[in-house]
Image (tube, rainbow, N blue to C red):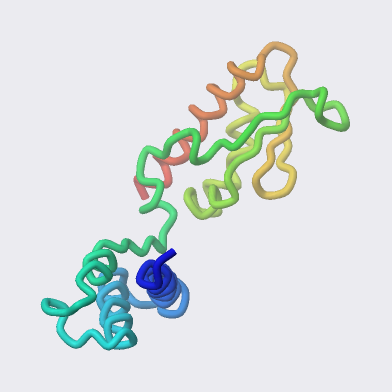
Amino acid sequence: MPTDEIILIIVTLAAVLYAGLIRPKLQKRKAIEETREWVFNKMGISDARTSKHDDTKNYLAGVQVITDIREYWGYPPKQHQIMEEIHPKSELRGDWDFAVHFHESSEQYLGSKIFNSLPKRFASIPGVDACSQEDREVYLIKTNTLDAEKLKEAIWQKYLEAAKEAFEK
């Protein structure tokens, strides 16, 4: 890998860390602008319009620092972003029929209050006999009538209802 590409990768990581982690209280646009200025200064780039580092500057100008999962996933969220997998009874211990796994950022996406309402929402699905939350992102489901695909679709619809509620706040 050429030296310029390595520098570009390191500088990009530094910019993302600086804007997203070190300076989280700044507004996003201000954080990005300050990050660019900081990176240019560290690289010895004095004028953003004229420099031998044009490729690096152009790349950094397009860097988007996403500090909010709602902004990153958008609305409505995509199912593949949120629902990770469903495990059948054969892979579980106990009397549960399915374990539904969600992305660990689902709580941040919905907000704690709405996220904590998910077990009741999932338990209200016709055909679901019981729902219990295990860990923060795993839901155990008991059902005698729903197969994995029907359950997945029903749970996804309940999640979308919760997401709509969260975004309408």
> Residue 12: x percent and y percent?
38, 69
Toward the right, the furthest residue is 94
Total number of numbered discs in the rendering? 0
Toward the top, the furthest residue is 145
> Residue 138: x percent and y percent?
69, 41
Q: Indicate whether 131 appears above or below 69.
A: above
Toward the left, the furthest residue is 49
Residue 52 appearing in the image: yes
Q: Indicate whether 127 appears above or below 102.
A: above
Residue 126 is drawn in which quadrant? top right
Residue 38 is drawn in which quadrant? bottom left
Residue 24 appearing in the image: no
Q: Nearer the viewer, residue 82 or 51?
A: 51
Q: At x 58% / y 45%, what residue is drawn?
A: 103
Position of residue 60 in the picture relative to residue 68 (left or right): left
> Residue 51: x percent and y percent?
17, 79
Position of residue 147 in the picture relative to residue 16 (left or right): right
Residue 65 is drawn in which quadrant? bottom left
> Residue 162: x percent and y percent?
47, 39
Position of residue 41 in the picture relative to residue 96 (left or right): left
Q: At x 74% / y 14%, what residue is drawn?
A: 144
Q: Nearer the viewer, residue 103 or 57?
A: 57
Q: At x 74% / y 43%, what residue is drawn?
A: 134
Q: Nearer the viewer, residue 88 or 109?
A: 88
Quadrant including the N terminus: bottom left
Position of residue 15 in the picture relative to residue 32 (left or right): right
